[in-house]
Image: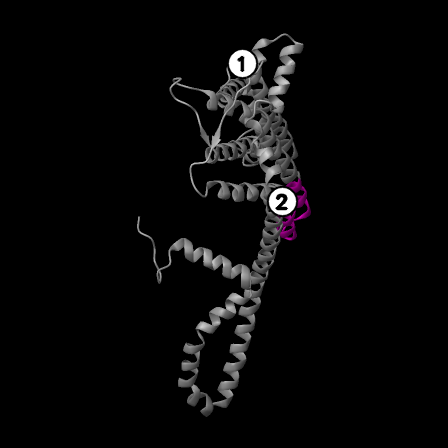
Amino acid sequence: MERLLIFGLGGQEILFIALIVLLLFGGRKIPELMKGLGKGVKSFKDGMNGVENDLNPDNNDKKKFSTFKSMQEANEKEMTFWDHLDELRKVFFRIAIAVILLACIAFLNKELLFDIVLAPQQSDFILYRFFTRLAADFSMPSLQVEDFHVELINIQLTSQFMIHMSTAFYAGLLLASPYIIYLLFGFISPALHEAERKTCLKIMIPGFFLFITGILLNYFVIFPLSFRFLATYQVSELVVNKISISSYISSFTMLSLLLGAAFEIPIIAYFLSKLGLITAPMLKQYRKYALVGILVIAAIITPTSDVFTLLLVSIPLYFLYELSIQVVGRSRKKK
Protein backbone atom coordinates (compact mmCIF):
# COMPACT_ATOMS: atom_id res chain seq x y z
CA MET A 1 0.00 0.00 0.00
CA GLU A 2 1.47 3.33 -1.05
CA ARG A 3 1.80 6.12 1.45
CA LEU A 4 0.45 9.56 0.82
CA LEU A 5 3.55 11.74 0.67
CA ILE A 6 3.63 15.52 0.92
CA PHE A 7 7.20 16.83 0.92
CA GLY A 8 8.32 13.41 2.13
CA LEU A 9 5.78 13.24 4.97
CA GLY A 10 3.28 10.41 5.36
CA GLY A 11 -0.36 10.87 6.28
CA GLN A 12 0.10 9.69 9.86
CA GLU A 13 3.10 11.96 10.28
CA ILE A 14 1.12 14.96 9.07
CA LEU A 15 -1.73 14.20 11.46
CA PHE A 16 0.72 13.80 14.33
CA ILE A 17 2.45 17.10 13.54
CA ALA A 18 -0.92 18.83 13.24
CA LEU A 19 -1.90 17.49 16.66
CA ILE A 20 1.35 18.73 18.18
CA VAL A 21 0.82 22.17 16.62
CA LEU A 22 -2.67 22.26 18.05
CA LEU A 23 -1.44 21.31 21.52
CA LEU A 24 1.47 23.75 21.48
CA PHE A 25 -0.15 26.81 19.95
CA GLY A 26 -3.81 26.32 20.77
CA GLY A 27 -6.82 26.84 18.60
CA ARG A 28 -6.66 30.62 18.56
CA LYS A 29 -3.22 30.72 17.00
CA ILE A 30 -4.14 28.58 14.00
CA PRO A 31 -6.25 31.26 12.25
CA GLU A 32 -3.39 33.73 12.75
CA LEU A 33 -0.93 31.30 11.19
CA MET A 34 -3.26 30.67 8.28
CA LYS A 35 -3.83 34.40 7.81
CA GLY A 36 -0.09 34.90 7.59
CA LEU A 37 0.06 32.60 4.58
CA GLY A 38 -2.46 34.75 2.72
CA LYS A 39 -0.92 38.14 3.48
CA GLY A 40 1.20 38.06 0.34
CA VAL A 41 -1.79 37.48 -1.91
CA LYS A 42 -3.85 40.07 -0.05
CA SER A 43 -1.13 42.75 -0.26
CA PHE A 44 -0.80 42.19 -4.00
CA LYS A 45 -4.55 42.55 -4.46
CA ASP A 46 -4.61 45.73 -2.33
CA GLY A 47 -1.82 47.21 -4.46
CA MET A 48 -3.79 46.61 -7.63
CA ASN A 49 -6.86 48.31 -6.16
CA GLY A 50 -4.95 51.15 -4.47
CA VAL A 51 -5.39 53.65 -7.30
CA GLU A 52 -9.13 53.08 -7.55
CA ASN A 53 -9.56 53.45 -3.78
CA ASP A 54 -7.65 56.76 -3.79
CA LEU A 55 -9.89 58.17 -6.53
CA ASN A 56 -13.08 57.19 -4.66
CA PRO A 57 -12.57 57.99 -0.95
CA ASP A 58 -16.30 57.66 -0.09
CA ASN A 59 -16.46 54.27 -1.70
CA ASN A 60 -13.24 53.36 0.06
CA ASP A 61 -14.69 54.24 3.46
CA LYS A 62 -17.79 52.16 2.75
CA LYS A 63 -15.63 49.24 1.71
CA LYS A 64 -13.47 49.57 4.81
CA PHE A 65 -16.53 49.65 7.06
CA SER A 66 -18.08 46.72 5.22
CA THR A 67 -14.82 44.77 5.37
CA PHE A 68 -14.37 45.52 9.07
CA LYS A 69 -17.93 44.46 9.84
CA SER A 70 -17.63 41.22 7.88
CA MET A 71 -14.28 40.44 9.52
CA GLN A 72 -15.75 41.17 12.94
CA GLU A 73 -18.67 38.81 12.28
CA ALA A 74 -16.33 36.15 10.96
CA ASN A 75 -14.05 36.51 13.97
CA GLU A 76 -17.00 36.18 16.33
CA LYS A 77 -18.00 32.94 14.62
CA GLU A 78 -14.43 31.67 14.59
CA MET A 79 -13.81 32.62 18.22
CA THR A 80 -16.76 30.54 19.35
CA PHE A 81 -15.33 27.47 17.67
CA TRP A 82 -11.70 28.12 18.55
CA ASP A 83 -12.55 28.92 22.14
CA HIS A 84 -14.09 25.51 22.49
CA LEU A 85 -11.10 23.96 20.79
CA ASP A 86 -8.74 25.84 23.07
CA GLU A 87 -10.62 24.60 26.13
CA LEU A 88 -10.40 21.08 24.79
CA ARG A 89 -6.66 21.54 24.31
CA LYS A 90 -6.36 22.57 27.96
CA VAL A 91 -8.28 19.48 29.00
CA PHE A 92 -5.94 17.29 26.93
CA PHE A 93 -2.93 18.98 28.50
CA ARG A 94 -4.24 18.28 32.00
CA ILE A 95 -4.95 14.68 31.08
CA ALA A 96 -1.49 14.26 29.56
CA ILE A 97 0.20 15.78 32.63
CA ALA A 98 -1.76 13.52 35.01
CA VAL A 99 -1.08 10.36 32.98
CA ILE A 100 2.62 11.16 32.50
CA LEU A 101 3.09 12.01 36.18
CA LEU A 102 1.44 8.80 37.38
CA ALA A 103 3.24 6.78 34.68
CA CYS A 104 6.58 8.19 35.87
CA ILE A 105 5.73 7.21 39.45
CA ALA A 106 4.87 3.69 38.27
CA PHE A 107 8.05 3.57 36.16
CA LEU A 108 10.22 4.51 39.13
CA ASN A 109 8.57 1.84 41.28
CA LYS A 110 9.55 -0.96 38.93
CA GLU A 111 9.70 -3.74 41.52
CA LEU A 112 6.27 -2.99 42.96
CA LEU A 113 4.75 -2.58 39.49
CA PHE A 114 5.95 -5.93 38.17
CA ASP A 115 5.37 -7.73 41.46
CA ILE A 116 1.70 -6.89 40.88
CA VAL A 117 1.65 -7.60 37.14
CA LEU A 118 3.61 -10.87 37.33
CA ALA A 119 1.91 -12.22 40.47
CA PRO A 120 -0.76 -14.27 38.59
CA GLN A 121 1.91 -16.48 36.99
CA GLN A 122 3.15 -17.75 40.37
CA SER A 123 1.82 -20.91 42.03
CA ASP A 124 1.36 -19.12 45.37
CA PHE A 125 -1.00 -16.49 43.92
CA ILE A 126 -3.94 -15.58 46.18
CA LEU A 127 -6.44 -17.47 43.98
CA TYR A 128 -4.47 -20.71 44.23
CA ARG A 129 -4.13 -20.32 48.00
CA PHE A 130 -7.91 -19.84 48.14
CA PHE A 131 -8.48 -23.04 46.14
CA THR A 132 -6.07 -24.96 48.37
CA ARG A 133 -7.92 -23.83 51.47
CA LEU A 134 -11.29 -24.78 49.97
CA ALA A 135 -9.94 -28.20 49.02
CA ALA A 136 -8.78 -28.79 52.60
CA ASP A 137 -11.92 -27.43 54.32
CA PHE A 138 -14.50 -29.20 52.14
CA SER A 139 -12.50 -32.29 51.19
CA MET A 140 -12.50 -31.46 47.50
CA PRO A 141 -9.15 -32.65 46.12
CA SER A 142 -10.11 -31.55 42.60
CA LEU A 143 -9.65 -27.93 43.70
CA GLN A 144 -6.12 -28.58 44.92
CA VAL A 145 -3.66 -26.70 42.71
CA GLU A 146 -0.34 -28.38 42.23
CA ASP A 147 2.79 -26.29 42.32
CA PHE A 148 3.94 -25.20 38.89
CA HIS A 149 6.71 -23.07 37.51
CA VAL A 150 6.65 -21.16 34.24
CA GLU A 151 9.79 -19.47 33.01
CA LEU A 152 9.34 -16.06 31.44
CA ILE A 153 12.04 -15.14 28.95
CA ASN A 154 13.02 -12.15 26.84
CA ILE A 155 14.11 -12.72 23.24
CA GLN A 156 14.62 -9.16 21.99
CA LEU A 157 17.19 -6.59 23.02
CA THR A 158 14.83 -3.71 23.77
CA SER A 159 11.74 -5.69 24.85
CA GLN A 160 12.16 -5.40 28.61
CA PHE A 161 12.71 -1.65 28.53
CA MET A 162 9.79 -1.07 26.16
CA ILE A 163 7.54 -3.34 28.23
CA HIS A 164 8.58 -1.42 31.33
CA MET A 165 7.58 1.85 29.67
CA SER A 166 4.29 0.57 28.21
CA THR A 167 3.25 -1.12 31.46
CA ALA A 168 4.00 2.04 33.41
CA PHE A 169 1.95 4.03 30.89
CA TYR A 170 -1.03 1.66 31.21
CA ALA A 171 -0.76 1.89 35.00
CA GLY A 172 -0.70 5.69 34.82
CA LEU A 173 -3.68 5.70 32.46
CA LEU A 174 -5.66 3.40 34.75
CA LEU A 175 -4.82 5.40 37.88
CA ALA A 176 -5.67 8.68 36.15
CA SER A 177 -8.95 7.40 34.66
CA PRO A 178 -11.20 8.95 37.37
CA TYR A 179 -9.55 12.33 36.81
CA ILE A 180 -9.85 11.90 33.02
CA ILE A 181 -13.58 11.20 33.31
CA TYR A 182 -13.98 14.20 35.60
CA LEU A 183 -12.24 16.53 33.13
CA LEU A 184 -14.15 15.25 30.11
CA PHE A 185 -17.45 15.55 31.92
CA GLY A 186 -16.53 19.08 32.99
CA PHE A 187 -15.86 19.94 29.35
CA ILE A 188 -19.17 18.67 27.96
CA SER A 189 -21.43 19.50 30.93
CA PRO A 190 -21.95 23.21 30.05
CA ALA A 191 -23.60 22.13 26.79
CA LEU A 192 -26.03 19.80 28.58
CA HIS A 193 -29.32 20.44 30.29
CA GLU A 194 -29.73 19.57 33.94
CA ALA A 195 -31.59 16.34 33.16
CA GLU A 196 -28.91 15.36 30.65
CA ARG A 197 -26.16 15.99 33.22
CA LYS A 198 -27.89 13.71 35.71
CA THR A 199 -28.30 11.03 33.04
CA CYS A 200 -24.61 11.23 32.12
CA LEU A 201 -23.60 10.88 35.76
CA LYS A 202 -25.89 7.89 36.15
CA ILE A 203 -24.16 6.25 33.19
CA MET A 204 -20.53 7.31 33.64
CA ILE A 205 -20.08 6.47 37.32
CA PRO A 206 -21.57 2.94 37.21
CA GLY A 207 -19.86 2.33 33.85
CA PHE A 208 -16.48 3.18 35.34
CA PHE A 209 -16.93 0.88 38.34
CA LEU A 210 -18.21 -1.93 36.13
CA PHE A 211 -15.12 -1.63 33.92
CA ILE A 212 -12.81 -1.73 36.96
CA THR A 213 -14.72 -4.74 38.30
CA GLY A 214 -14.13 -6.57 35.02
CA ILE A 215 -10.41 -5.81 35.19
CA LEU A 216 -10.23 -7.07 38.79
CA LEU A 217 -12.09 -10.27 37.90
CA ASN A 218 -9.61 -10.88 35.11
CA TYR A 219 -6.63 -10.21 37.39
CA PHE A 220 -7.74 -12.41 40.27
CA VAL A 221 -9.60 -15.21 38.43
CA ILE A 222 -9.64 -15.35 34.63
CA PHE A 223 -6.04 -14.63 33.71
CA PRO A 224 -4.37 -16.77 36.42
CA LEU A 225 -6.45 -19.82 35.45
CA SER A 226 -5.97 -19.25 31.73
CA PHE A 227 -2.25 -18.67 32.11
CA ARG A 228 -1.71 -21.76 34.27
CA PHE A 229 -3.56 -23.98 31.82
CA LEU A 230 -1.99 -22.65 28.62
CA ALA A 231 1.52 -22.22 30.02
CA THR A 232 1.65 -25.79 31.39
CA TYR A 233 -0.12 -27.45 28.47
CA GLN A 234 2.15 -29.69 26.39
CA VAL A 235 1.54 -31.68 23.22
CA SER A 236 4.66 -33.67 24.02
CA GLU A 237 7.27 -33.88 26.76
CA LEU A 238 9.84 -33.07 24.10
CA VAL A 239 8.42 -29.54 23.81
CA VAL A 240 9.31 -27.24 26.68
CA ASN A 241 7.20 -24.16 27.32
CA LYS A 242 9.07 -20.90 27.70
CA ILE A 243 6.77 -17.90 27.58
CA SER A 244 8.08 -14.55 26.39
CA ILE A 245 7.42 -11.56 28.60
CA SER A 246 5.87 -9.69 25.68
CA SER A 247 3.35 -12.52 25.14
CA TYR A 248 2.48 -12.48 28.84
CA ILE A 249 1.90 -8.71 28.96
CA SER A 250 -0.08 -8.59 25.72
CA SER A 251 -2.36 -11.46 26.81
CA PHE A 252 -2.86 -9.87 30.23
CA THR A 253 -3.74 -6.50 28.68
CA MET A 254 -6.08 -7.99 26.07
CA LEU A 255 -8.04 -10.06 28.58
CA SER A 256 -8.30 -7.10 30.95
CA LEU A 257 -9.81 -4.95 28.21
CA LEU A 258 -12.16 -7.73 27.10
CA LEU A 259 -13.47 -8.39 30.61
CA GLY A 260 -13.77 -4.68 31.30
CA ALA A 261 -15.80 -4.26 28.11
CA ALA A 262 -17.93 -7.33 28.91
CA PHE A 263 -18.92 -5.79 32.22
CA GLU A 264 -20.40 -2.84 30.33
CA ILE A 265 -23.38 -5.01 29.30
CA PRO A 266 -25.89 -3.07 31.46
CA ILE A 267 -24.72 0.24 29.98
CA ILE A 268 -25.00 -1.12 26.43
CA ALA A 269 -28.45 -2.51 27.24
CA TYR A 270 -29.51 0.91 28.51
CA PHE A 271 -28.58 2.61 25.24
CA LEU A 272 -30.20 -0.13 23.16
CA SER A 273 -33.41 0.29 25.14
CA LYS A 274 -33.35 4.03 24.54
CA LEU A 275 -33.11 3.31 20.83
CA GLY A 276 -36.08 0.96 21.11
CA LEU A 277 -34.09 -2.10 20.02
CA ILE A 278 -34.61 -4.18 23.18
CA THR A 279 -37.14 -4.34 26.00
CA ALA A 280 -37.19 -5.97 29.42
CA PRO A 281 -39.80 -8.59 28.37
CA MET A 282 -37.59 -9.48 25.41
CA LEU A 283 -34.57 -10.04 27.67
CA LYS A 284 -36.69 -12.11 30.07
CA GLN A 285 -37.96 -14.20 27.18
CA TYR A 286 -34.41 -15.07 26.09
CA ARG A 287 -33.10 -15.54 29.63
CA LYS A 288 -32.59 -19.29 29.21
CA TYR A 289 -30.67 -18.84 25.98
CA ALA A 290 -28.57 -16.12 27.60
CA LEU A 291 -27.70 -18.44 30.48
CA VAL A 292 -26.56 -21.16 28.10
CA GLY A 293 -24.54 -18.64 26.08
CA ILE A 294 -22.91 -17.29 29.25
CA LEU A 295 -21.95 -20.80 30.34
CA VAL A 296 -20.43 -21.51 26.93
CA ILE A 297 -18.46 -18.24 26.97
CA ALA A 298 -17.29 -18.92 30.54
CA ALA A 299 -16.19 -22.42 29.52
CA ILE A 300 -14.17 -20.98 26.64
CA ILE A 301 -12.38 -18.27 28.61
CA THR A 302 -11.67 -20.64 31.54
CA PRO A 303 -9.63 -23.52 30.12
CA THR A 304 -9.86 -25.54 33.35
CA SER A 305 -12.45 -28.31 33.36
CA ASP A 306 -13.84 -28.02 36.91
CA VAL A 307 -17.38 -26.76 37.44
CA PHE A 308 -16.40 -24.51 40.32
CA THR A 309 -14.22 -22.33 38.10
CA LEU A 310 -16.94 -22.29 35.46
CA LEU A 311 -19.47 -21.01 38.00
CA LEU A 312 -16.97 -18.54 39.40
CA VAL A 313 -16.88 -16.80 36.01
CA SER A 314 -20.43 -17.37 34.76
CA ILE A 315 -22.24 -16.13 37.90
CA PRO A 316 -20.96 -12.52 37.60
CA LEU A 317 -21.80 -12.50 33.87
CA TYR A 318 -25.31 -13.78 34.50
CA PHE A 319 -25.73 -11.24 37.29
CA LEU A 320 -24.90 -8.54 34.73
CA TYR A 321 -27.58 -9.93 32.43
CA GLU A 322 -30.19 -9.76 35.21
CA LEU A 323 -28.99 -6.27 36.04
CA SER A 324 -29.47 -5.32 32.40
CA ILE A 325 -33.10 -6.46 32.60
CA GLN A 326 -33.69 -4.19 35.58
CA VAL A 327 -31.92 -1.26 33.91
CA VAL A 328 -33.92 -1.65 30.70
CA GLY A 329 -37.20 -2.00 32.63
CA ARG A 330 -36.61 1.19 34.58
CA SER A 331 -35.51 3.15 31.52
CA ARG A 332 -38.69 2.16 29.65
CA LYS A 333 -40.89 3.13 32.64
CA LYS A 334 -39.38 6.64 32.73
CA LYS A 335 -40.53 7.20 29.16
Determine the main secondary structure of the stretch shown in magenta: helix
The type of residue carrying mark 1 is Asp
Per the image, the residue denoted by label 2 is: 176
Q: Is residue 41 above or below residue 8?
A: below
Q: Is residue 115 above or below residue 292?
A: below
Q: In the rendered image, is residue 27 in sight?
A: no
Q: Residue at x 35, y 60 (%)?
A: 8
Q: In the rendered image, is residue 61 in sight?
A: yes
Q: Residue at x 63, y 30 (%)?
A: 327
Instruction: Name the secondary structure under disc 2.
Output: helix
Of the two numbered discs 2 and 1 on the same chain, state the one appearing first in sequence: 2
Residue 285 numbered tag: none
The local crowd at label 2, few if under 14, some if 14 to 19, many if 20 or more residues have their Cα within 10 Å, is many
Please check the rendered image and state whether residue 3 is part of the magenta-colored stretch, yes or no.
Answer: no
Residues at badges 2 and 1 in contact (C-beta under 8 Å)?
no
**Residue 114 placement: quadrant:** top right
Q: CA distance from mark 2 to mark 1?
A: 38 Å
Instruction: Name the secondary structure under disc 1.
Output: loop
**Residue 169 placement: quadrant:** top right
The type of residue carrying mark 2 is Ala
Per the image, the residue denoted by label 1 is: 306
Which span is picked out in magenta? 176-201
Q: Position of residue 300 (x, y in %)?
A: 48, 21
